[in-house]
Image: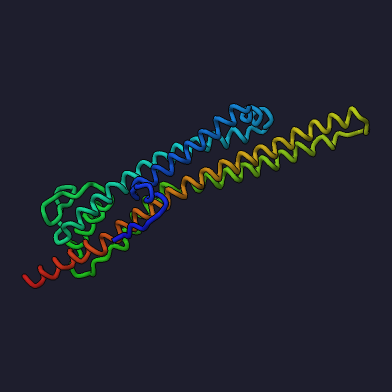
Amino acid sequence: MVADTLNFWRLFGIERHHQLLLKWLIITVATVFGAAAAQYFGLFAEVISSDRSRISIAIMVLFVLTAIHCAVRTFEISSQLNQTAQAAQQIKAHPEYFALADDGVVVGNGERLQPSLLTDHVRDLIIKSAVGREAPLDSKVLLETMEARLKGRQEIGWFVSDQMLRLGLLGTVIGFILMLGPLIDIESIDISSMRAVLSAMSSGMAVALYTTLVGLIGAILVKVQYYFLENTTDELVALTSEVSDVLVVPALQGRRLESRHAS
């Protein structure tokens, strides 16, 4: 079975299937605190007023929407891991028999498995075992399909984080264009004209720096959230794979052999 290795969270008595939600809460609280501090010191107003390209606002809106998506996925994966852990305990207690029951699965003592990804996977294995009696029972394809389905919903996070970096780079280019543009209009060098040029150049530099800063911060925060989310998804798939390969597949193959001998 999946080993309950000692880690930082277990030192505080936090079980594996609650760690993702706690990590998300810590990141969210830190982000909200940082945003509140930036608002208090007027950094948001400074960025919005200085960024004539409005790319910083686009990055902020994109970050908020992606954070909401990550929150929804975090609750879903955390709930699935919790339910799968409960189903795994039921299977460990009675691994000798598995049968279909309506849309669910019952184990050896007649108890119905907790609805979860593991239960759905066991149901698919039972159906596959009944249909392809001559072929060896292999759960690899089913697991790959489940993993692709789970991670496919999270690819948006990695895509958005890359686009945030690109938007920041675009803002940098626009800022340099705005910064160097006034140099073309210089006809004479005097104090008043140089003052106007330097003012325009500083405005362009503000666009370049602020869009780069907002893009970097947004991309880092999104990547951290989806990194934890993907790690927990891998753990969910690993738990499902180990329980099914160690306990479910051998039991189903044993039933196959018994039915062959009986016939």
Residue found at the far bottom of this picture: 261
257 sits to left or right of 241: left
Q: Could you tell me if residue 263 is visible in this image?
A: no
Give x and y (percent) for residue 123. Answer: 21, 54
Q: Is residue 1 above or below residue 28?
A: below
Q: Could you tell me if residue 136 is visible in this image?
A: yes
Occupied quadrant, residue 245: bottom left
Give x and y (percent) for residue 183. Answer: 84, 37
Colour style of the rendered protein structure: rainbow
Q: Which of 99/108 is in front?
A: 108
Give x and y (percent) for residue 59. Answer: 57, 37
Residue found at the far front of this picture: 11
Quarter of the image containing the N terminus?
bottom left
Occupied quadrant, residue 263: bottom left
Q: Which of 141/195 is in front?
A: 195
71 sits to left or right of 84: right
For the point 32% across and 49% down, which residue is it? 81
Give x and y (percent) for residue 254. Answer: 15, 68
For the point 64% across and 40% down, which residue is it? 213
Count of numbered labels shown in the rendering: 0
Q: Which of 165/71 is in front?
A: 71
For the point 45% across and 40% down, which residue is it? 26
Q: Which of 32/136 is in front?
A: 32
243 sits to left or right of 57: left
Q: Is residue 98 above or below residue 182?
A: below
Occupied quadrant, residue 219: top right
For the point 36% across and 55% down, which residue is it? 235
